[in-house]
Amino acid sequence: MDTAIWKPVALVKDISPDTHTLRVMHEGEAVCLYELDGQVCATQDKCPHGNASLAEGWVEDGTIECPLHQGVFDIATGKPQCPPVTTDLRCYEIRVEEGTVYLRADEA
Ligand code: FES
């Protein structure tokens, strides 16, 4: 039985069709939502390399490019793809029901 707690954070339609991103707050952390050809993903919003919001970056071919120093991450895995980024992004478990995006809450 799935006892996980899922918290609503946004509507899918609120994810920008231009940038394919939306910054939301989840349990005190900034999270970036991505809409990729109908699939929604979520990673931490703050770039681990510096003080940049990935929601302000560029989405291309399943990757997000940081707006500050152009580090690139794979959105689905959080893996860095090129310098200067070397640290994985945290990826969040996500669920979409009736147009609402839910993120899994940390265990208490
Ligand atoms: Fe993101 Fe430097 S702050 S690559």
Image (cartoon, rainbow, N blue to C red):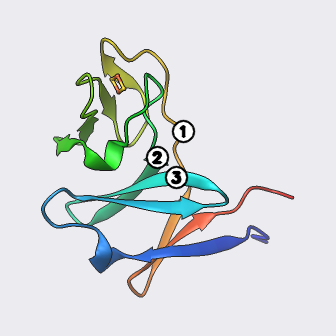
43 sits to left or right of 20:
right
Residue tagged 1: 90
For ligand 1, the image quadrant comes to: top left
- Whichever of callouts 2 and 1 sits on the residue coming sooner in the sequence is 2
- Asked if 7 appears above or below 57 in the picture, the reply is below
Badge 1 element: loop
Could you give the CA–CA distance between mark 2 and mark 3, rounded to whole angstroms?
9 Å
As measured in the structure, the alpha-carbon distance from the residue carrying label 1 to the one carrying label 3 is 11 Å
- Callout count: 3
User: Which mark sits nearer the N-terminus, 2 or 3?
Assistant: 3
Write down the residue under mark 3.
30
Q: CA distance from mark 2 to mark 1?
A: 5 Å
Check disc 2 and report the residue beneath it: 43
Using the image, determine if residue 3 lies above or below residue 34.
Answer: below
For marks 1 and 3 on the same chain, the one whose residue lies earlier in the sequence: 3
**Residue 38 point in image, percent of width and height:** 25, 67
**Callout 1 crowding tier (Cα within 10 Å): few <14, some 14–19, many ≥20:** some
Disc 3 secondary structure class: strand
